[in-house]
Amino acid sequence: MKFGKQPAPVADINEDDLEVHKPKSEAAGVKAVMVALERAVAQAGVARTAHSLLRLNQRGGFDCPGCAWPESDRKRKAAEFCENGAKAVAEENTLRTVGSEFWAKHSIAELSTKTEYWLGNQGRLSEPVVIRAGETHYSPISWAEAFDLIGEHVRASTPDRCVFYTSGRTANETAFMYQLYARAIGTNNLPDCSNMCHESSGSALNPTIGIGKGTVSLDDIHDAELIFVVGQNPGTNHPRMLSALKECKDKGGKVVAVNPLPEAGLFNFKDPQTVSGVVGGGTPLADEYLQIKVGGDLALFQALGHLLLAEEERNPGSVVDHSFIDAQTDGFDAYRQARAELDWAETEKATGLTRAQIETVAGMLIKSKASIFCWALGVTQQPHSVDTIKEMVNVLLLQGNFGKPGAGACPVRGHSNVQGDRTMGIWEKPKEWLLDALDTEFGIASPRHHGYDAVEAMEAFERDEVDVFVSMGGNFSLACSDTETLEAGMQRIGLTVHISTKPNRSHIVHGRTSLILPTLGRTDKDDKHPKGAQFLSVEDSMSVVHSTQGRLTPVSEHLLAEPVIVARMAEATFGPDHSVDWKAMAEDYDVIRDHIARVLPGFEDFNTRVRTKNGFVLPNPPRDTRSFKTDIGRGRFTVSPLEYLTPPDGHLVLQTIRSHDQYNTTYYGLDDRYRGISGGRRVILIHPEDLVELGFKDRDLVDVVSTFRGHDRKADKFRLVAYPTAKGCAAAYFPEANALVHKENVARESNTPGFKAMFVRFTPHGADGAAEVSSEELEPATEGLIPGRSYKREPVRT
């Protein structure tokens, strides 16, 4: 451990430094605390770190810029954050800065060779910069000139040739202004990070339960009798969820983990804020672990539905909530008929599980009177992901697991305010009621035709049909699929505008003219207003809206708040006589919230309610009244055919994953501690038996080729690492593997890229592929990862 403020790294990633150790069998613990503090102090020093962490996720403080997991509405801990939350704050708190000297020193040609790790670790952007056609370096530009440039380009274009992307970091007030700006221009081209992650969830939930959000509260997680954690790695992506699962376990609940990778966070949690987490053995979390094949979840939930219905037939009234189904749902008879028979051989092939394993967890469901299904991107990024989530809804409806304590659907959102952005109107397919309300409130004429989502925007780049691309946060070039195609398309755009806190790859693969506009982060004070310091609001994964207010002095006097940036773009675009008073909103965020209160249902008296201790909870009919606001006024059972991923001979199914030292496209470091990977990122985690069958050895250096509808994509120089993943499946880090996802490999209905659905093969990289890497011998992949737990195909039945 090195404690003390450290300069930005000069060296970039050297993949020859890769080290491989045994995967961990536990998550969190004292090590997590030490790593969090080390990273935070290295970026910001002791005083700034202490000042920020003590306010993180506290009432009157600021919301973590990382995940969207909710805080308790009761007593909060002094350290109400996780390791990765502390890392996220450290990235923003850093005292390293990127100014004119940096841009003068580094050309675009040089920066294009740098990894995201190197770029992000250089520090906070400290002044607006521009690069124009033919120039080799970014150079400073005044804010006034920058906004004039944006206005000129937008006015010279047409609405449908302008695209406005949104990252989940964006607060509610900013998102509302941003979508208003786009619609005032005349476009619904509002792609956002939801398009790449939980769009499939909304596409499945809206038609079946009438709302595209989860239907549980944090108390429901605590009170559940049974929780399924499906396609999700909470130990890295939502670590505070582990505390909620622990409380459920302490109260007698059970947990079923469903994942191709045996993630440490799914098993043993060592809470560093408890004695047992520091000196004891921690809390075992998963009572059952189903190591499912990538893409096998639809088959699993069809089988579970079949088994529940079979038990109900044997013992009428023991499983199915008929009174709820009769009163509140539609389609049950068709669903029951579809699940009356099951091809077990096909189900075992699709899932990689045995019938006995599936029957074991079905027995747990049958006994449970309050069950929750949690899921994340392991479910949503498949061609059949919408059908999979609908099948999960079927099983929940079957037992009446809506509108009662400890029960419901829980899509676990990744980014801090990604759900709030959608609530605020960031969507390319807006509802008519929203457009009517905006037009009435602001005297504009919102466009009615749908705009581009993220994949459609990428395709428009490729067709040279975009003149202006504005990115409110985020890193679009590394967030979406088909990297080479995407980046080539971005460089065709007339003007790219990046409203950012730190350098990233999207700034380097810029349009013919490009602006980088530095903005305040969550932790920064926003006090340059006539009425003094302002606060913003966010919505967490469970529909709770609460305030967030930074308290740290910004690293540069040249940073502007995001609402101010939106307002000044709008003023530069429309001039002083526009029907929308942009200046009033930029000066006083209460004005924005008053507009929101009049436009969006559930936000009545917004300014008063957001100032209460815990904020307020948005209406949720399935949870609040056990009702469903679908087009038929009922919850809807659906019937989907069996579907799973079947790669060609000689291929594996590849899924992308995050490192433990990473959040989305941001790299905090190079240590994927729980999986035992450090020093490098270009690795393929592969089952040892697949290595042998494909004719390779552990640590071979290969090129990876993906195939989709006869089209190949290639990514060079990946290291094969023997790992206990599901046989026939492999995993690689996002975004390094994004280049392998063909832009047309998407989920039906949601158009989400198929990051968990690549068919890949490997070819030797060449004679130079034998670079030495240090390692420890991995234990056999089928046994011994978790002490006392067997990973053989045939489990012990309970």
Image: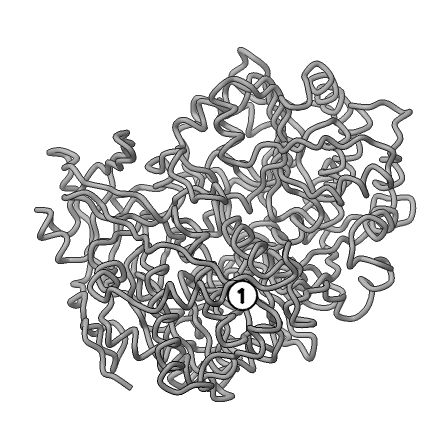
Q: Position of residue 180 (x, y in %)?
A: 76, 37
Label 1 Cα neighbours within 10 Å, binned few <14 / some 14-19 / many ≥20: many
Q: Secondary structure at mark 1?
A: strand
Vertical arrangement, residue 592 with respect to residue 179, above or below = below
Q: Please state which of residues 638 and 659 is positioned toward the viewer in this rendering.
A: 638
Q: Quarter of the image holding residue 52?
A: bottom right
Q: Position of residue 414 (x, y in %)?
A: 53, 56
The three-letter amino acid code for the residue at tag 1 is Cys
Q: Please state which of residues 729 and 211 is positioned toward the viewer in this rendering.
A: 211
Q: Quarter of the image holding residue 716?
A: top left
For label 1, the residue is: 410
Vertical arrangement, residue 263 with respect to residue 715, above or below = below
Q: Please state which of residues 663 and 485 is positioned toward the viewer in this rendering.
A: 485
Q: Position of residue 688 (x, y in %)?
A: 15, 58
Residue 255 appears left or right of 241: left
Name the residue at 38% across, 81% down. 313
User: Outermost residue toward the top?
Assistant: 134
The number of numbered badges drawn on the structure is 1
Q: How is the image coloured?
A: one colour
Residue 28 appears left or right of 95: left
Q: Position of residue 191 (x, y in %)?
A: 58, 37
